[in-house]
Image (cartoon, rainbow, N blue to C red):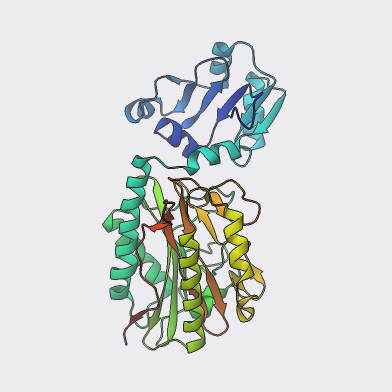
Amino acid sequence: MERDLPEWEMAAIFGRVNQYYFCGTMQDGVLLIPRDGDPVYWVRRSYERARAESLYPDIRPMQSFRDLAKEMGKVPDTCHVEAELVPIALLERFRKHLPAKRFASLDRQIAYVRAVKSSYEIDLMRRSGEIHRHVLDDIVPLILREGMSEADLGSELHSALIAEGHHGIVRFSMFGNEIVLGQIAFGEHSLAPTSFNGPGGAVGLSAAVPLLGSRDRKLGKGDLVFLDVGCGYEGYHTDKTVVYQFGAPLPERAVAAHRTCLDIQQKMAALLRPGIIPSDIYRAVIADIPDEYKTDFMGYAGRQVPFLGHGVGLEVDEYPVIADGFHEPLSIGMAIALEPKIGINGVGMVGVENTFLVRPGGGESITGVSEGLIEVGF
């Protein structure tokens, strides 16, 4: 805050994931941080649970923001909030009792703080990564069977992950993104256009619920199976993509494209070292993409996403991003998912994704080292 916002006066943290990060519990409340006073975690519901779960030194109950106003005294002119998360209606209710003249964003500052993980956070992510690796590499090949639907696979995959310790949901910070597991698709369904900001695709259950997987698309011999799913343990996530060949080999052109993605991920992983600039990684990779893949790299038929990887932690879309515009150097403790992918007409989305830790000698994968294209049912 001091470096980027030297004149800051007060911060109010409403987001429940951020409350968990700073306070160790997720409640209906607000963490109020005045510049010239001690922070207080005000909780509407449940105060009792907050006290049971959190070691935060000052937790107080409130019925409404009126209770804050009684204790606050003079209200600063500017209050910094999570502008990407907080609805205007909530801010107006807050301002009714704490009449700040102006609200400003502290999203970037929180993102910077959360980007570097502690040893405690990394331990939880390692556990998530091992669950992720075991289920996608070892269990999914035993689940896949001819005639099952994408929805069948999604349901059985979710159960398998939970049985191994997955916390059951996948969290994103991006507004409007809700997810059960991720993208679950057979064949060209993995190229379907979606509102989700990622290179792969999926049809989902319906237009109203474009999640989990289609009930109608059944698995057949020669199909590609595309799984781009999240996993989590005690709040902390990893991200991983594995593709499978079911019943028969994929065409050589798809295999060649997949190998290109593996090479790209290996080169990027070697660059995940402290001091390296994310945008430099991005530009170097994009400059070397073979001509035959340029229109279908990180997407399909021109529907491409402008990144190659993203931070992971309490949410799957964290800072930093391997993309243009991200110029802050990498640091030890950052966790980044690298996901080079290529869409193949008539086949589906090939490629790979693993979650890496930034290390002095290059990225360390915590979700395994499988090269994908796992053969099942040959």
Asked if one can make out residue 122 in the rendered structure from this viewpoint, the answer is yes
215 over 46 or under it: above or below: below
- Tell me where residue 98 appears, x and y as whole percent: 63, 19
185 with respect to 142 (left or right): right
| Residue at image location 54% in from the left, 12% down from the top | 71
- Tell me where residue 91 appears, x and y as whole percent: 64, 30
| Residue at image location 63% in from the left, 29% down from the top | 80
328 with respect to 143 (left or right): right
Looking at the image, which residue sits at the far right?
Answer: 101
- Tell me where residue 167 appears, x and y as whole percent: 35, 50
261 with respect to 97 (left or right): left
- Tell me where residue 102 appears, x and y as whole percent: 71, 27
Asked if one can make out residue 196 in the rendered structure from this viewpoint, the answer is no
Quarter of the figure with the C terminus:
bottom left
Q: Nearer the viewer, residue 300 or 149?
A: 300
Quarter of the figure with the N terminus:
top right
Question: Residue 149 lies in what quarter of the image?
Answer: bottom left
Question: Residue 163 lies in what quarter of the image?
Answer: bottom left
